Amino acid sequence: MEILLVKNAGFCFGVKRAVDLTFKVAEDESLPAVALGPIIHNPQVIEELGKRGIATVDKVPDNNSIIIIRTHGIEQNLYGNILKSGHRIIDATCPFVKKAQQYAKLLSEEDYQVLILGDSNHPEVKGILSYAGGNASVINSSSNLPILGRKVGIVVQTTQLQEALKALISNIVGKVSELKVFNTICNSTALRLKETEKMARKVNLMLVVGGKNSANTTQLAHLCKSLGVTTYHIETASEIKKSWIRGINKIGITAGASTPDWIIEDIKDKLRHIGG
Ligand code: SF4
């Protein structure tokens, strides 16, 4: 049985930066430190951080603490309130997400009606929206457009597909007098999707590794399934069943941006162990 790993599987630049910053806080700092919301969408990493004293909380604590901001960023008001209340911030927002927030702010300041292409429930999108002014909307496809004004500006959730952005632009371009687009899609996601697609076309089974709550991991699993290859989305090696690999001679592994190397290694070990 051959086990193949997708190039660029696992931690992306932004997640690696956030995780490194957070582990450093756990080692170096004496003040209590908490992560405001899961620092990344991976339950095993969150658990490991918890063991090292960094709890994940959903609201800002009262006592003087270090507040670590997750890769997806937070809403503008909340950021301001934390600073005002005297806590120290360690900002692990991915620089690419920061850029999307800044572009949303810029568009709003230049009087554009801001459209954010993305999932309105995702924390990254909620954060970007908070910078985009009162006349902004989140849309999840080119077909659910709000009433459009004369000047429209677009920013994009970093994990969206280029095709979705192209469809949106071509739907809007004839309807407004001015259209400004900031393509804030992250290359890392696009690259991982491309390499995963290549892999899914040449194996009999795909294992997609990462948090079930991770948007980009779920996207990878959907992609593989849509190509007709048998696909399992798992978080850890313990979920692998022997029956999955019976009669399989080539297994592909891909992993979302928030999946650490040690989980991928565990999975390879388990496959070698049960597959011979
Ligand atoms: S996928 Fe891209 S935008 Fe998201 S955290 Fe990683 S580097 Fe940043």
Image (cartoon, grey):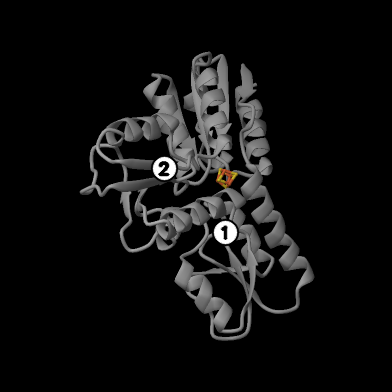
Q: Is residue 148 left or right of residue 248?
A: left
Query: Compared with residue 49, is residue 122 higher up or lower down, i.e. above or below?
Result: above
Q: Nearest the camera: 117 or 233?
A: 117
Residue 37, percent from left and from top = 51, 64
SS label for mark 1: loop
**Residue at the image point whose x is 63% and y is 32% from the top:** 8
Quarter of the image containing the N terminus? top right
Quadrant hosting ligand 1: top right
Residue 202, percent from left and from top = 53, 13
Q: Is residue 72 left or right of residue 178?
A: right
Q: Within 8 Å of ligand 1, the CB of disc 2?
A: no
Residue beneath disc 2:
180
**Badge 1 amino acid:** Ile
**Residue at the image point whose x is 39% and y is 35% from the top:** 165
Give the residue at the far right of this rendering: 28
Q: Quadrant of residue 67?
A: bottom right
Residue beneath disc 1:
39
**Residue at the image point whose x is 61% and y is 67% from the top:** 68
Q: Nearest the camera: 158 or 202?
A: 158
Of callouts 2 and 1, the N-terminal one: 1
Give the CA distance from mark 2 to mark 1.
31 Å
Query: Compared with residue 176, is residue 202 higher up or lower down, i.e. above or below?
Result: above
Residue 120 visible to the viewer: yes
Asked if the residue at tag 1 contacts the one at tag 2, i.e. Cβ–Cβ closer than 8 Å, the answer is: no
Q: Residues within 10 Å of mark 2 (few under 14, many from 20)?
A: some
